[in-house]
Amino acid sequence: MKKAFLLAAGLALALGSTTASAADVEAGKKVFKKCKACHSLKPGIKKVGPSLHGVLGNKAGQVKGFKYSKAMKKADITWDDASLDAYLTKPRKFLKGTKMSFAGLKKKKDRDNVIAYIKANTK
């Protein structure tokens, strides 16, 4: 019985530590350097890509004055942590026909960190 308790406690601790691991905003700032040539976090600043200010919680393809691909305009995506994570993994695989030429971020930690950085800097 004691072994079962210890096993259950260890499992709970292990699961808790993986889900509780916080993203690192400062590390995200470094990862965002790959994004900033094409994207701004300031409202209304369009570059090769649209401003990412206010992207979270909003539907894809909605920044006024930015010329999106047909695929992005038609996409029924509301940007949240999960959809951004999937998109940033491999944009062209996630959304066939997107104009975004970026290959993606392979490391989950990099994606988590850059999403945290975007959140922290676009309120």
Image (spheres, rainbow, N blue to C red):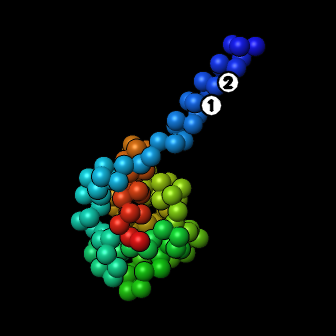
Give the residue drawn at x 52%, y 35%. Answer: 17
10 Å crowding of disc 1: few (<14), some (14-19), many (20+)? few
Which residue does the numbered mark 1 point to in the structure image?
A: 12
The numbered mark at residue 79 is none
Give the residue drawn at x 48%, y 68%. Answer: 56
Q: Quadrant of the N terminus?
A: top right
- On screen, residue 78 above or below 87: below
* Position of residue 11 in the picture relative to residue 1 (left or right): left
Residue 74, image x and y in percent? Answer: 55, 75
Label 2 element class: helix
Residue 26, image x and y in percent? Answer: 30, 52
Q: Are marks 1 and 2 in contact (CB under 8 Å)?
A: yes
**Which residue is at the far front?**
2
Residue 47, image x and y in percent? Answer: 27, 75
The amino acid pointed to by label 2 is Ala
Evaluate whether residue 105 shows in this view: no
10 Å crowding of disc 2: few (<14), some (14-19), many (20+)? few
